[in-house]
Image (cartoon, rainbow, N blue to C red):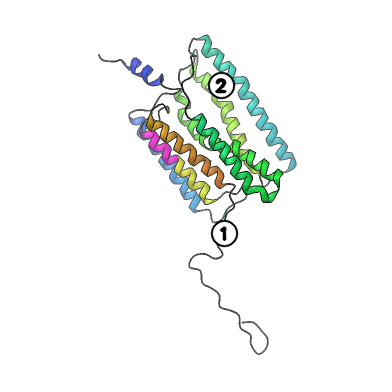
């Protein structure tokens, strides 16, 4: 029996919450992600030393926290509207199985503990605050590019204007992601290093492989494995921001200065 396009479309989307990529779209997606990974890796090679971001002033810190709280509030207001409209149109059914949430929860717990242990030398308050910031910011390194990829392919589309309801959902979500990542500046432990760029580049490469397979919902072994791997790499990128960086005593191949000698006049040469 031959299936129509609409039947194939429904069969694909019933497995998850977004429509997989297919045909040329898969190749384009993978190409864009590989190019982005190359840019991130190149930026890492151009970073000579770990860079500590400027610490915000007291007023800036207050503004960042207020903006973050506002973003979360807006998202929590918009989400019920989105769900209500889906239910009104009889499109909201039981959510599909989500095998990734336990992985995310474990990663959050691990990065919290590791950052707290690493930061104990700065005092327990600084270590606790840094661990909390790292734990909430780490998932956003994964979520921002992920949401860009699936945003236009979420399923089911919400009538009467699917684009409007996608904006209603994703606009405040992006604001939450941006403001959460901005909180990294509040931690005295954060330093941007080459490893951070390289881990982010590796995550995008995994995304590219996932894209070539259709970037499907993690209900099958391959999408599940690629989803888990990319999320673990994203948390490694976040952790690299907090781990102390060792600066080599001298650059490889650098000439070693000869010991000073003393002349009869008492001058060092």
Q: Which of 199 and 51 is in front in this view?
A: 199
Magenta-colored segment: predominant secondary structure: helix
Q: Residues within 10 Å of mark 2 (few under 14, many from 20)?
A: some
Residue 136 x %, y %: 60, 35
Task: Judge whether residue 143 can be spotted in this image.
Answer: no
Q: What element carries label 1?
A: loop
Q: How crowded is mark 1: few (under 14 residues within 10 Å), some or many (20 or more)?
A: few
Q: In this view, does 133 lie above or below 5?
A: below
Q: Which residue is drawn at 46% across and 48% down?
A: 41
Q: Do the residues labelled 1 and 2 touch (CB within 8 Å)?
A: no
Q: What is the count of numbered marks?
A: 2
Question: Does residue 46 show up magenta in the picture?
Answer: no
Q: Residue at x 71, y 48 (%)?
A: 123
Residue 99 x %, y %: 47, 28
16 relative to 262 in the view: left or right: left
Give the residue number, with chain letter if any, for mark 2. 168
Which quadrant of the figure has residue 225?
A: top left
Give the residue number, with chain letter if any, for mark 1. 247
Name the quadrant of the C terminus: bottom right
User: In the rendered structure, which segment of residues is drawn in magenta?
Assistant: 204-212
Foreground tag (1 vs 2):
1
Toward the left, the furthest residue is: 1
The label shown at residue 173 is: none
Q: Nearer the viewer, residue 39 or 110?
A: 110
137 relative to 31 in the view: left or right: right
Q: Which of 95 and 140 is in front in this view?
A: 95
Sequence-wise, the earlier of marks 1 and 2 is: 2
Toward the bottom, the furthest residue is: 264
Q: Residue at x 36, y 18 (%)?
A: 11
Toward the right, the furthest residue is: 58
Residue 232 x %, y %: 49, 39
Residue 3 x %, y %: 29, 15
């Amino acid at each position: 029996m031959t299936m129509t396009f609409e039947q194939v479309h429904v069969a694909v989307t019933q497995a998850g919450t977004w429509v997989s990529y297919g045909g040329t779209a898969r190749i384009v997606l993978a190409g864009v992600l590989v190019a982005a990974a190359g840019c991130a890796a190149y930026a890492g090679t151009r970073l000579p030393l770990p860079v500590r971001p400027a610490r915000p002033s007291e007023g800036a810190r207050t503004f960042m926290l207020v903006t973050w709280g506002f973003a979360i509030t807006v998202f929590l207001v918009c989400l019920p509207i989105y769900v209500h409209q889906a239910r009104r149109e009889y499109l909201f059914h039981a959510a599909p199985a989500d095998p990734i949430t336990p992985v995310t929860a474990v990663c959050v717990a691990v990065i919290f503990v590791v950052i707290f242990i690493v930061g104990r030398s700065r005092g327990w308050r600084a270590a606790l605050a840094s661990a909390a910031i790292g734990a909430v910011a780490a998932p956003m390194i994964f979520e921002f590019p992920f949401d860009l990829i699936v945003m236009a392919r979420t399923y089911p589309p919400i009538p009467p204007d699917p684009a409007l309801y996608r904006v209603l959902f994703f606009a405040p979500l992006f604001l939450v992601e941006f403001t959460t990542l901005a909180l990294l500046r509040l931690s005295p432990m954060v330093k941007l290093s080459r490893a951070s760029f390289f881990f982010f580049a590796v995550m995008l490469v995994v995304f590219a492989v996932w894209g070539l397979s259709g970037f499907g919902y993690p209900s099958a072994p391959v999408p599940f494995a690629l989803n888990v791997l990319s999320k673990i790499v994203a948390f490694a990128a976040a952790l690299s921001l907090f781990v102390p960086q060792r600066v080599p005593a001298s650059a490889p191949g650098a000439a070693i200065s000869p010991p000073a000698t003393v002349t009869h006049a008492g001058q060092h040469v």
